[in-house]
Structure formats: C-alpha cells, structure tokens
Amino acid sequence: MTQASRLRDLLAQDRCHIMPCCFDALSAKLIAQEGYELTFMSGFAASASRIGAPDLGLMSYGEVADQLRNIADAVDIPVIGDGDTGYGNAMNVRRTVQGFARAGAASVMIEDQLAPKRCGHTPGKAVVGRDEAFDRIRAAVDLRAELRESGGDILILARTDARHDHGLSEAIARAETFAELGADILFVEAPQSEAEMREVCANLPGPKMANIVEGGATPDLPNAALHDIGFSIAAYPLSVMASAMQAMVTTLRHMRQDERPGQMDFVELRRRIGFDDYYDASERYASSRRDHSG
C-alpha cells in the first residue's frame, strides 16, 4: 500500500486526526514513535530549522524537496509536504507535485497566496486572482492523474488564504472550486471563530483540514469539537518546534550557570534515534566479523 493510499484510508474514517507537524527527520521520527498516524512538514518550522529564517518564501524548491525527502525516508507514516505556491506558474506547480511524489510525500499542499508567500497567521499576505489560483490546482490535479497512469500517486491539499483580505465567502467559493477541480483535501486558512469554522465545513465537500496555531487567529478547540464541526485533520504546525525551542533555550540558560536541567537520558535518546535498531540489524552480519577476527 502506498502512503497516498494510507492517507486516503485515514481520511475515510469518521474522526478528526490530530496531526503534529514536523520540521526535520528527527521530529518526524518522534511523532511516529508516539503513535501519530500522519504528519505534515510545516513550511514555517522547516524554514526555521533548516535556514534559521522566517517563513517568508526564502527557502527554495530544492531545499524544501530535500528536507521532505529526508523526512519521508525516516518514517513509515503518511507525510504531507508544504508546496507553498508551487514556486512559480502552473508548470512550476506540476514540477513541485512530481518532485514531492518522488520524495515520498503522500500529499502536497498548494496555496493561492501571492509569492513570496507568508505564514497564514502573520500580516502582509495576499492572494492571487481566482483564475491563477484555479490554474495552480488544475495543474496539480493534472499531474496527479499522470502519476497514476505510471503507477504513482499523491493527494492534492488545496489551500486558500482569501479569508484575510476578501472575507470568508470568497475563501469558501475558492475552496469549492478547488474541490470541483479535483482537490482531495480542502484547507481554508485562518477562520477567526468557531462559527466561521462551522460555516467552512457546512459549505464544503470532502475532507477538510483545520490549522491550529497556538496564539493564532483560529480558535484552539478540543479535538472532539473539531470532529463535530466537520474537520478530518487538525494540524498543529508549531507545537513540536515551539516545545523543542523552549527546551533548548532552557538548557542553554541553565548551562551558563553550570546547571543541568532535566532532560532525556542517554539510553532513551539512543533508542529513539535508532541505535538499538541499528545494532540489532547488524547482528545478522556478525559471522563475517567473527570469521575475519579468527
């Protein structure tokens, strides 16, 4: 079963999947180890981790695809990749979808922001016109069809940020057309109340994703409430990275005072990284080492 097929099966379930977002291979591995069934490579978190810079369109397509490849190689759960605006026109979108599929993504997110894009919960973002937005999704869907003809597969997660400048009705209208064009998952970014979240889900078909940024514009509701509203996925793009950053800052401040705060012990650290699995697998080849030493 492909990761795309696994993701489809998850979306067919009557539940809202909690999806912590990763930023590198290690964070993705920890998410999988804790039993989560899918993850998302957050563009915000990946930009911070890989280049130490804000999510303002500074990472190139090549850097993003490389980060995604490392993440997908590290885990056996579906990974959704943040494809931003597709890095150009409709032909660039096609290349992005194809590259993400080759990197191992189960799904690729394509959005309608004006390049360079911005985090959906920060000021200054704007969206392209409807025609260009629809062309991006049409190109992504066309490439998905071509992949299937050759045995590949990937889901299209279509995002609109139109709520910010044009209101919720425009955002819903765009997402509705995304669905008509063949998008598999719909994502209306930054609804600003529970009532708006309910309006989104009531007016759109198929699986919907909520994006929960602690301190952001969208209410941070319990998972049961998100399921009741109609969401299939609840993405938490910054929770893991924010926790990791807080732990690192705390450790660094304690070390300046020659103190050691509580931290993961060395045995568990090695196990989670994969040392134990490596040693267990290497025992299959121990006979050659013994023969050589004898």
Image (spheres, rainbow, N blue to C red):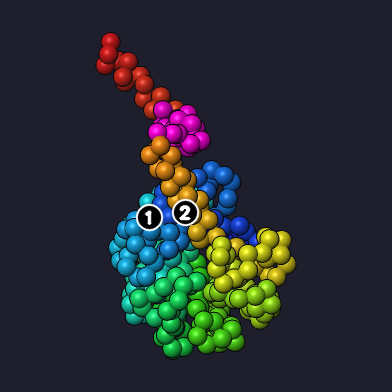
Q: Position of residue 72 (x, y in %)?
A: 43, 53
Judging by the rendered image, the residue that carries numbered circle 1 is 49
- Left or right for 53, reference 171: left
**Which residue: 60% across, 63% down?**
234
**Which residue: 73% across, 67% down?**
228
Q: Circles 1 and 2: CB distance less than 8 Å?
A: yes
Say what amino acid the circle numbered 1 marks: Ser
* Residue range highlighted in magenta: 258-279
**Which residue: 56% across, 57% down?**
19
Say which label, 1 or 2, has the lower sequence index. Answer: 1
Tell me if residue 183 comes above or below residue 169 in the rendering. Answer: above
Judging by the rendered image, the residue that carries numbered circle 2 is 241
Q: Residues within 10 Å of mark 1 (few under 14, many from 20)?
A: some
Where does the C terminus fall, quadrant-wise? top left
Q: Position of residue 217 (x, y in %)?
A: 57, 72
Label 2, secondary structure: give it.
Answer: helix
